[in-house]
Amino acid sequence: MNTGGAWAQMISQSIKVGEAPQNMNYNPSNGNMYVANFNSGDISVIDSATNKVISTIQVGSSPNALEYNPSNGNMYVSNLDLVLAIDSDTNKVIQSIDAGDSPQFLKFNPSNDDVYIGNLGQVLAIDSATNKVISTLRIPHGPSFLKYNPSNGNIYVVSDPNSDADTDVKGKVVVIDNATNKVIHTIGVGKGPSFLKYNPSNGNIYVANENSNDVSLIITTKTNSTS
C-alpha cells in the first residue's frame, strides 16, 4: 500500500522566522501566532490566513515567555531585562516595563486582570489598565513556575531551594491572593518542584517534584493544604 501521499499531506509548509524560536502564543484578538526568537531578539508574527510572517518586532536580548492579555488586547514578552507590551492592532511595542533581574515567567490572572512576572527572586503584578507594576513580592529560591487557579482566582508560584543552592531540601509553593496581591499561603511540597497543573475536575493543584520522584497534591478546598 502506498502511504507516501498521505504522509506528504500532513506536512503543509515551513515558515521561516528568526533565530532559535523557543516560545509561541496565539493572539485571539487578531488571530495571529507570535513566535519568540531567542537568538535574534525579535518576535515573528504569523498571519493565520496566509501562514506568512507579516511583522517582525524587535524586543531586545533573548525573548522567552509570551502571554496574551484579553483585558487590554496586548501580547506581553519578557527578555533578559524587561517585559514589553505589544499592541495587537499595530504589532508595535507600546510600553517597556522594568521587570527586575531576568524575567522569565508570565501569567495572566482573569480574576483581577493583572499580569504576573516571575524573575530571579520576585513576582511582580502588572495592572492591565496602566501596564505599570502595582505589587512586588519577594520569592526566595525562585520563582521557577507560575500557575493560575480558576477555582479560587489565585496565582501559585514554585519556590525551589535546589535551583540556586545544593541544599537538597524540600521545595515550596507560594500562593498569591488575587484581591490583595499578597502571599497568603506557603505550602511544603517535594524536592525540586518544577511544574504545576490545575485539575478542573476536582479543583486541586498537582506539583511535579523532579528530585524526589513524586507528585504533591494541593487540596485547594482545604485551605491550600497537601493533606
Image (cartoon, rainbow, N blue to C red):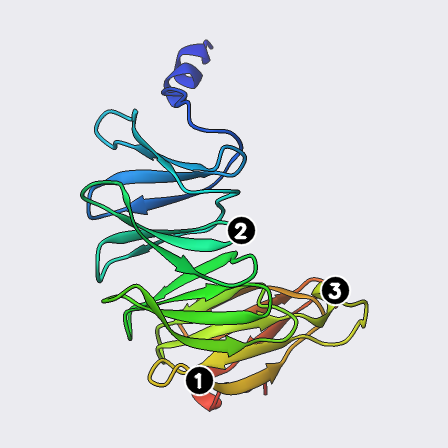
From the image, state whether disc 2 or disc 1 is nearer to you: 2
Counting from the top left corner in percent of width and height, residue 2 is at 45, 9
Mark 3 and mark 1: span between their CA atoms? 29 Å
Q: Are marks 3 and 1 in contact (CB under 8 Å)?
A: no
Residue 200 makes an appearance in the image: no
Q: Nearer the viewer, residue 78 or 66?
A: 78
Residue ID for mark 2: 80
Residue ID for mark 3: 211
Residue 121 sits above or below residue 27 on the image: below
From the image, state whether disc 3 or disc 2 is nearer to you: 2
Amino acid beneath label 3: Asn
Q: Nearer the viewer, residue 94 or 73?
A: 94
Residue ID for mark 1: 182
Circle 1: is it few (<14), some (14-19), or many (20+) Cα within 10 Å? few
From the image, state whether disc 3 or disc 1 is nearer to you: 1
Amino acid beneath label 2: Leu
Element marked by disc 1: loop
Q: Residue at x 20, y 42 (%)?
A: 30
Dot placed on the residue nearer the N-terminal end, 3 or 1: 1
Dot placed on the residue nearer the N-terminal end, 2 or 1: 2
Mark 3 and mark 2: span between their CA atoms? 27 Å
Residue 130 sits above or below residue 96 on the image: below
Counting from the top left corner in percent of width and height, residue 60 is at 46, 42
